[in-house]
Image (cartoon, rainbow, N blue to C red):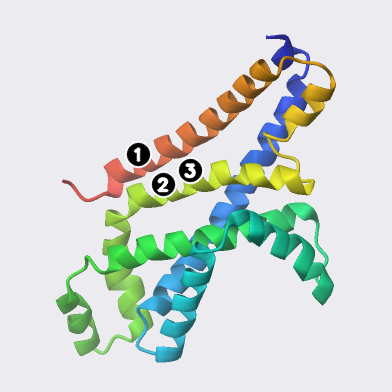
Amino acid sequence: MDALTDNFSLYGKGFLGTVELTVYASALALVLGFVMASFRVAPVGSLRAFGTVWVTVLRNTPLTLLFFAVMLGLPRFGLVLPFELFAVLALGCYTSAFVCEVLRSGINTVPRGQGEAARSLGMTFTQTLGTVVLPQAFRTVIPPIGSTLIALAKNSAIAGAFSVTELLGTYKTLSELGYNIVWTFVWIAVGYLIITLTISALFHVMEKRWGVAR
């Protein structure tokens, strides 16, 4: 217990750093994922192509490599931001590709006739997608989106290697102070468990309220 009780503020700072990364990157991933899913099913060929390239590139790029590209590449083009924002950008963009595909799979479960009926009433593509298709698709993809955001929370550990305050990075300080490395990682694991179980519980409540009965 000494590793935790003697360094509670250090663990707390790392825990809050991971929570902030998870929340902000999740918000970015959901917004970008929604936009890219819309592009993927849009009637405009250039938008579909852009969405396809976005998903293909990001899903097949190692997250660590993406961190290097964002942290080291963007400043060369004059974009200088705090490392925390760079980490949110890397995590959010990476996860958005997976959110996009989850949403697109949900869109594909909605009967095509509903979209055609909406268009026959004079609704635009945006109106059809936003008021008819996506509300139904969302109900079917609540569990996989929850799983995707849980993965994001665990992936945030990579940010610690880039001078971003987060939970896993606390082991370096504690190791230098001579604390038992096993118990150091045990309490780090407990912190991640709290975060992932909270996300899981939140999406379980959402699924019970809005999910499709199976």
x then y, percent, for residue 96:
50, 62
> Which residue is under mark 1?
204
Q: Residue 150 carries which label?
A: 3
Rendered position, 23 above or below 93: above
Report helix, strand or loop for mark 3.
helix
Residue drawn at x 19%, y 83% as measured from the top left: 116
Disc 2 marks which amino acid?
Answer: Gly
* In contact (CB < 8 Å): disc 2 and disc 3: yes
How many marks the image carries: the answer is 3
* In contact (CB < 8 Å): disc 2 and disc 1: yes
Disc 1 marks which amino acid?
Answer: His
Say whether residue 117 is left or right of residue 132: left
Disc 3 marks which amino acid?
Answer: Ile
Q: How crowded is mark 3: few (under 14 residues within 10 Å), some or many (20 or more)?
A: many
Earlier in the chain: of badge 3 and badge 1, it is 3
Rendered position, 212 above or below 76: above
Q: Distance between the residues labelled 2 and 1?
A: 9 Å
Residue 115: in sight, yes or no?
yes
Q: How crowded is mark 2: few (under 14 residues within 10 Å), some or many (20 or more)?
A: many
Q: Which mark is residue 67?
A: none
Say whether residue 11 is left or right of residue 32: right
x then y, percent, for residue 111:
17, 71
Residue drawn at x 77%, y 15% as measured from the top left: 179
x then y, percent, for residue 190:
57, 24
* In contact (CB < 8 Å): disc 3 and disc 1: no
> Which residue is under mark 2?
146
x then y, percent, for residue 129:
33, 75
Q: Nearer the viewer, mark 2 or mark 1?
A: 2
Earlier in the chain: of badge 2 and badge 1, it is 2
Q: How far apart are marks 3 and 1 (CA)?
A: 13 Å
Residue 28: in sight, yes or no?
no
Front residue (pair 139, 5): 5
